[in-house]
Amino acid sequence: MPTVSRRSRVLSVVVSPSLALALASFAATSLRAQVVEVNLTAAPGTAQVAPGVSVNAWLYNGSLPGPTLRVTEGQTLRVRFQNNLPESTAIHWHGQPIQLGMDGVPDISRPATAPGQEFLYDLQGLVPGTYWFHPHGHEMQLDVGMASMLIVDPANLGNDPAFDVEQTIVLDDWTNPLGGAFTGQLLNGRSSAGQTPISVQAGQRLRLRVVNAAAQQNYIFALDGHPMTVTHADGNRVQPVVVQAIPIGIGERWDVIVDCNNPGTWSLAVSTIENRNATLVRGVVQYAGQTGPLPAATYVPTNLAAGSLLNYSQLASYFPVQPITATPNRTFTAAFDMSMSMGGGGMVMTHRINGQTWPNVTPFQVAAGDQVQMTLFNNGMMGMPMMPEYHPAHVHGHFFRLMGTAGGTANPPLKDTVLLRPLGQAGSSVTVQMTMNNPGRWLLHCHNMEHMASGMMTAVEYLGDADADGVVNRSDYEPMQPLPVVTISDQANAFTPGASNSIRVQWTPARIFGLFIGADELSPWVQAPGLGTLVLDPATAAFFGMGVTSALGSVAIPYSLPSSPAIVGLRVGMQGVGVTSPTNSLVLSTFQAMTAR
């Protein structure tokens, strides 16, 4: 599809394109085993949130919430993501400590995916538990329906508690920014009027996997007539704790087991965290054979209003974890606060961490192998004590070990999101430790989208160059993999007929890189020993262009698309080879596709 304007270069090594791909396909090992492949599309649509009531939304695979993706520990999840939205987007796999390049943060892990383009998420080393995925860097997108669950089952099923029936619960606030006839709270994409009862039988054990996917609302949930046994916090198994109600901050997940020993038709009720005496939305748990009316949407169960409430201090890890150390390598504080000032013709609200707003922040700098202690605290609203705020603090790429809990120093619970209560309340400060075992540049932010959009975000930045590729960790799209990374523009106009732009490659400075394009991909992918993973089919590939990476480790290979509308819809895959020094051996790049739009 593209034509390239090639500049003459004096190259110290001449790479034969046909030889490069021939070597890559030689002695290759199939990568089909243990790979789960799914297609995921983001596109505008409508969702029925109550009988006869529809709203405009942006959706994953046309549903609200999106499809639940499910794999088993040890499997690779390969998600071919297609963006059919009118703006760029990316997917963050919330809570999973995966490699940076797949974390879905625009301009940190990769450029965002432009409208009409695709990205291939190759998720390896997934941790068992309940997780979810959503856009990042485009805050409004979460508020219009783009949220789905990711479940990773343990390879050894004995590592999970026994249960008979399972139900995912996605809580969301709906403010209707795209238009529609409903504003309020949703449970699994429906208001109270649209709920289908969860059916159970007496004697069964019901597992609920609950996620707060709201943009701005923290909740409390409870099941009328039943206590709940907490088994997992943010995907990580904990020692069982029996409670009647559970606070759930934005981004948090709680797994609970309910012993179904009280036949009837019961309300799974949800309130705000500020007011337990008003049910915002409710689901229904109904025992087989029960025919009575469903609980009223406004009914407030005793468990919700006054039942025992889960507290972080009750948690302890079920499995062995890195213990709390009395001598952390680095100690930090992160103060979450808000200020208001006049500007732009009105009052401007700014949310900050340590007095700074993203992107003008001083990162927390760490080294691989560090044990880092951090105190996260809610410093309130400067000069506005009567306007308390909650801040669900979320870290990417790592788990927190919560200090001061029932787990003590030997078995602290692991979480990736902790809810900081308002200044002056118990729980406004949390001290955690983290093992720095995933080099890169990782976000730490409030998961309230309004707070995040107005600046409440910073970074945890690894020093050094973990993969010794000459690109430092804080700038490297793949800090643990010394391979060339191929990227395309995040702008839609880069792919229209007649457009000129470039394919960008990040890799070791002052190295030769050759790019190939082709119509087909291998199925399955193949592992070429010493070269990497081959995705582009050599049988249909052609040499496209060559360049030398700059001192900063990047090279742009230009292209110009034909101006004919006949190319619209034409898709090509791209993969290249880099030449290492001093041996002049070859290494395969990442794969990327582009489509003329």
Image (spheres, grey):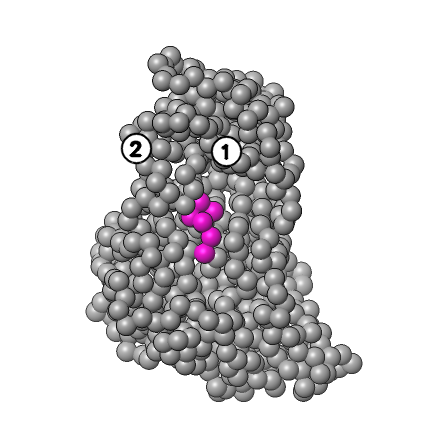
Q: Position of residue 484 (x, y in %)?
A: 43, 34
Q: Is residue 253 left or right of residue 467?
A: right
Query: Residue at 67% of width from left, 63% of height from top?
Result: 51
Residue 456 lies left or right of residue 544; in this view the side is left
- Which amino acid type is marked by label 1? Leu
Above or below, comparing residue 132 to residue 482 in the picture:
below
Q: Is residue 198 left or right of residue 399?
A: right
CA separation, marks 2 and 1?
A: 23 Å
Image coordinates of residue 29 in percent, x first then y, are: 61, 38
Secondary structure beneath dot 2 equals: loop
**Residue 28 or residue 303, whichever sits in front:** 28
Question: Which residue position is annotated with label 1?
Answer: 531
Where does the magenta region start and end?
97-102
Q: Is residue 98 magenta?
A: yes
In which quadrant of the rendered image does the N terminus lie?
A: top right
Position of the C terminus, as image quadrant, is top right
Crowd band around label 1 with a 10 angstrom C-alpha radius: few (<14), some (14–19), many (20+): many
Give the secondary structure at mark 1: loop
Residue drawn at point x = 53 percent, y = 45 percent: 121
Q: Position of residue 500 (x, y in %)?
A: 44, 22
Could you say which disc has been placed on residue 552 in the image? Answer: 2
Q: Nearer the viewer, residue 581 or 542?
A: 581
* Percent position of residue 166, x then y: 65, 70
Q: Residue furthest right?
A: 289
Q: Amino acid at mark 2?
A: Leu
